[in-house]
Image (cartoon, rainbow, N blue to C red):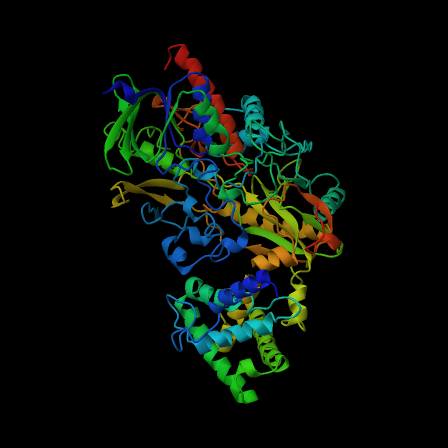
Amino acid sequence: MNRRTVIKNLALIIGGATLLPSCFQEHGKASMAFKKINVSADQERFVADVAETIIPKTDTPGAKDLSLHLFVLKMVDDCFSKKDQDAFMAGLDKLSKEAEKRYDKPFGQCSQQQRESLLTELDQKQMAYQKAQNAHGKNLKKELPADDMLAFYGITKGETIFGYTNSKYFMTKQIVYELIPGRYNPNFPVKNLKAGIKHG
Amino acid sequence: MSANNTYDAIVVGSGISGGWAAKELTEKGLKVLMLERGRNIEHIKDYVNANKAPWEFEHRGGRTQKMIEDYPVLKRDYTLNEANLDYWVNEKESPYVEDKPFDWFRGYHVGGRSLMWGRQSYRWHESDFEANLKDGIAVDWPIRYADLAPWYSYAEKFAGISGNRDGVPILPDGDFMPAMEMNVVEKDVSARLKSYYKGNRHMIIGRTANITVPHEGRTNCQYRNKCWLGCPFGAYFSTQSSTLPAAMKTGNLTLRPWSIVTKVLYDKDTKKAKGVEVLDAETNKTYEYNAKIIFLNASTINTAWILQNSATDIWPDGLGSSSGQLGHNLMDHHLGVGASGMVEGYEDKYMYGRRANGIYIPRYRNLDGDKRDYIRGFGYQGRADRDRWSRDIPEMNLGGDFKDALAEPGAWHMGIGGFGETLPYHENRVYLDKTKKDKWGLPVPVINAVIKDNEMKMRIDMANDAKEMLEAAGVKQVNTYTSEAVLGKGIHEMGTARMGRDPKTSVLNGWNQVWDAQNVFVTDGAAMTSAACQNPSLTYMAMTARAANYAVEQLKKGNL
């Protein structure tokens, strides 16, 4: 390991430390200050584990690498109504308990498969709920689902994906985002879309 | 009165039409004072968010609860967003009263809404100017297409409008720069519509005030699609990019921000205006400025407000109110009706660059022998687009494969939304609230306007036709939408000081002069006698240049 690599890794560790609950932090508190919601370190970790299940680390970075859980919490804190925030926090705890009940260990310690199975169930419930609502001709988008777990998962999933697809990583390494395209090509081959291929 | 408070002309407002008035009058040698009620926004330097990447916005462009609380009107539409929040009026400082719901989206700063406008630029047609006469609606326009045609050319050449000469009879071609291109789906949809409707309906690329070649020291469009943050390239027409530098270059312009014009000062002896009263928005001090001619370009509702607050000792309802029409006949384009669906195929195609423009379907209803159960018509704006990420696959809702799929392009879809003509109804109006005051203690405007039967019937066609056309063009799973018909959403307010042929039934004459004070010109949306269904700003530009030319001619002849 040469000097430059050491410095780079050190920077990564220091950078990462602000995102992870660590012994330097006040015990039990989330790693970030919120204005409206009250989030404990455990709750933050749970949101991070849910986000990581949606966008897991593979050969490319996952939700935790990109701190998407902090983005989710920031959005909940700033952009959602009191009612939605309450549903989110209540759903968070319910789902966390539900996971422990089902698998006898905290959600974060479950296998990816167990975690996926639990969340996929919620996706299916949500779809069934939506179908029922649509059959009644109601506009679902306006009202959050009555089930707090669905509310929590719906917000977490939506904001995780929103945060991911709007992250610098995604927009520079997964797709090509140019601030100044300088041209419009209305007949652009899809095969050239991926990052790393020359555009124009 | 000190001499330095006296100018040849005063222009009230610095938006699209005010900027044009300042340019035309200064270029003709007049010393002009342009008054703007809000702060200054300097070209490029003050476009603070224009060069931010999407991930640099704290909420990635979203809206916070605080914003929703602070902007009870702006929140009603896409207009409330994190990226250009500073360009919208502070609603707490400048409230208004809604007798009926009316979305009033304002920009109180130098450049006004020319900074955030949609840039779609269409000429009116001869029949639009004849429609009121033909239908026996309101009053006849005192001008015809031929009166404006040379001024349309003049405005297009300077502002820089890109578009094709499409040869669609109802939508006169103009002096355009090279058009932007349609994407593959739009091209096919356009061709299918043409064949299905045997050449009677057209889908064309939008005509937009984004320049496609360098022009007047401005750089051509860079396909960022961030226009409403302010363009660092000056690639779309705004006061800042276009008319203001031209006016400044003459050395004849004085721009005074933070200047709320509270009154036009009327001289009973000369029967003309002698100047305006200004309340300094920062110091609350009152000033008087004098000029031989005054152009009111404060935007439709505020121009009416200034007139209604002026000369009340002679006319209780304000300067220009002798006809009883001042503040009345408020119009907007009614919208929020259309359809969208999925487009199959074109899997190997995408587009590169972000085109700040869509497609346009010019009006076809009640034309060429078509007869509906309503009068006038509507046009559509829309676009075909491709989702950035993969469509929802039920069995793939999370996990590694899902993550990878987010970077894949999804399905193509196509949507169109109508812009309908609203008739000038006398009872749709604005007036001053006698009790409620704004931050500066000034009476606030009250807006009372709704659409009626003619528009409601039109909206049925707007939805059904959209579906029929998309389906005819091969679009699948087409759904229509019809949102509540609230005026103001079109951000095309018009008509509160209409032009006409008779001082008994109109506020302005055929040269945009207030009948009751002929050295006062109104050349913003307030002047409009009817609304047509095309986006109106290009018409304001042409009308302003024409009126300014006339005003200077008359001034030279000693008639003003």
Number of on-image labels: 0
Query: In the figure, is residue A40 to the left or right of A67?
Result: left
Q: Quadrant of residue B63?
A: bottom left
Q: Quadrant of the N terminus of chain A?
A: bottom right
Instruction: Please say if B257 is above or below B551.
Output: below
Query: In the figure, is residue B216 to the left or right of A197?
Result: left
* Coordinates of residue B76 in the picture (x, y in percent): 45, 53
Q: Quadrant of residue A86?
A: bottom left
Viewer-proximal residue, B384 or B197?
A: B384
Residue occupying the point 43% across, 54% down: B75
Q: Quadrant of the C terminus of chain A?
A: top right
* Coordinates of residue B59 in the picture (x, y in percent): 48, 58
Viewer-proximal residue, B510 or B376?
A: B510
Q: Residue furthest top?
A: B557
Query: In the figure, is residue A99 to the left or right of B339?
Result: left
Residue occupying the point 39% across, 52% down: B71
* Coordinates of residue B395 in the picture (x, y in percent): 68, 73
Residue occupying the point 53% across, 34% down: B237
Asked if residue B370 shows in the view, the reply is: yes
* Coordinates of residue B41 in the picture (x, y in percent): 41, 37
Asked if residue B273 shows in the view, the reply is: no
Query: In the figure, is residue B467 to the left or right of A63?
Result: right
Instruction: Please say if B525 is above or below B48.
Output: above
Instruction: Please say if B188 is above or below B209.
Output: below
Instruction: Please say if B255 is above or below A92.
Output: above
